[in-house]
Image (spheres, rainbow, N blue to C red):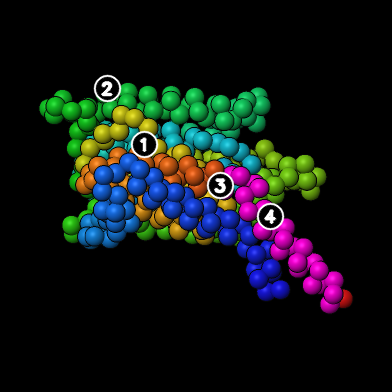
Amino acid sequence: MKTSKFIVKYFDLIRIISAVIIGFLLALVFLFFVSDDPLNAIKTFILGPFASKRRFFNVIELAIPLLFTSLGMCFMLKVGEFNLIVEGGFMLSGAVVAWLASTALPPGIPPVIFPALLIVVGALVGMACGLIPALLNIKWKANVVVVTIMLNYVLTFASTYILRYWMRDTSVTYLGSHKLAQNAKLHTLLRGTDLHTGIFIAIAAVLFTWWFLNRTTKGFEIRVTGNNRSFAKYVGINVASSMLLAQMIGGALAGVGGAVEILGKYDRFLWVNQTGYGFTGLMISVLALNQPAAIPFVALLFAYLQIGANIVGTTTDVPSEFVMVIQAIIILLVAATLFMESLRKRAVIKLSKVEGEVK
């Protein structure tokens, strides 16, 4: 009785945990086939992120940009839109912020004001990126998936254009911007690591997302619009406004993430290709069932897997790309609606029989 109730109540959580475990185990099996020393590769993959202080904090450092992009995707999916613009918005915001911090603005702006100003600019750039496909979808019924996939390429090329023609440092042999003003950078929290004060901004973003979606009228309207637009219209919710607001906030969060990542971890802007943070954020949001409270844990899991894979790739004969096997298996199992469905049905039937006997 208690077991059946638990399965029915927490079925989605059980499915996700099972998918993670299966994906992890299959990845370990994969290592046995591709490595000449599989036991060492497995040990390195599992324990590598905990082998030193720097590696451990690398996990947290990587989770910071993933938090922003997954929170941005959370807003997009909550309103029922598969808007993928967080990838391009993240990169373009980073490029604009780097241009302002390295070339356009005077370096003498006070340390606290300078990064705060740049983060606001990053949010506005990301918001504008989220606004474009939202307007195209609302006004002309453009397919938001197609629009954002293509627009991501446009924003990527725009970012590289800014790098090449607005802020390139020709004194270095690689493609990079001039150095960011020291006053613009976020402070490092721990010596010997790249952990920076952006972690506090990321935590604030998580709290804001949870509060806005669960404790405000606009958040309620966004959730109702995402669940059933016909019902939302029937009860008087402005569906177009909710769709627009959610995608603008989602884009703004991605923009803040791009600004925080550049100001926290880089001395120059070096991105010439898409970062991949946006698409990983989509996977995290889906895996977390679009629940802001669960997103930090899933982001840390993905960061742990990626850092472990990077360590394996540099210290063993296994390519770091094998982590994509884990991610693909997990997402496929979570997306498969019939995965473990028989377990839920058996629990429901058993619970119904018990309750029927009680009556």
Using the numbered discs, state the Cα–Cα distance from disc 4 to disc 2 in whole angstroms. Answer: 58 Å
The disc placed on residue 97 is none
Q: Residue at x 55, y 36 (%)?
A: 83
Q: Where is residue 285 in the image (x, y as percent from the top left)?
A: 52, 48
| Label 4 vs 1, first from the N-terminus | 1
**In this rendering, position of residue 126 left or right of residue 83:** left
**Which residue was labeled with disc 1?**
275
Alpha-carbon neighbours of circle 1 within 10 Å: few (<14), some, or many (≥20)?
some
In this picture, is 174 found above or below 33? above
Amino acid type shown at disc 4: Ser
Q: Is mark 1 on a helix, strand or loop?
A: loop
The disc placed on residue 165 is 2
Q: What element carries label 3?
A: helix
Q: Where is residue 5 in the image (x, y as percent from the top left)?
A: 69, 69
| Foreground tag (3 vs 2) | 3
Q: Do the residues labelled 4 and 2 touch (CB within 8 Å)?
A: no
| Foreground tag (1 vs 2) | 1
Using the numbered discs, state the Cα–Cα distance from disc 3 to disc 2 in whole angstroms. Answer: 45 Å
Alpha-carbon neighbours of circle 3 within 10 Å: few (<14), some, or many (≥20)?
some
**Residue 204 in sight here:** no
Amino acid type shown at disc 3: Leu
**Which residue was labeled with disc 3?**
333
Q: Where is residue 325 in the image (x, y as percent from the top left)?
A: 43, 42
| Label 3 vs 4, first from the N-terminus | 3
The disc placed on residue 342 is 4
| Label 4 vs 2, first from the N-terminus | 2
Using the numbered discs, state the Cα–Cα distance from disc 1 to disc 2 in whole angstroms. Answer: 20 Å
Q: Which residue is drawn at 87% across and 76% down?
A: 359
The one nearer the camera, 127 or 357, is 357
Dominant secondary structure (helix, strand or loop) of the stretch shown in magenta: helix
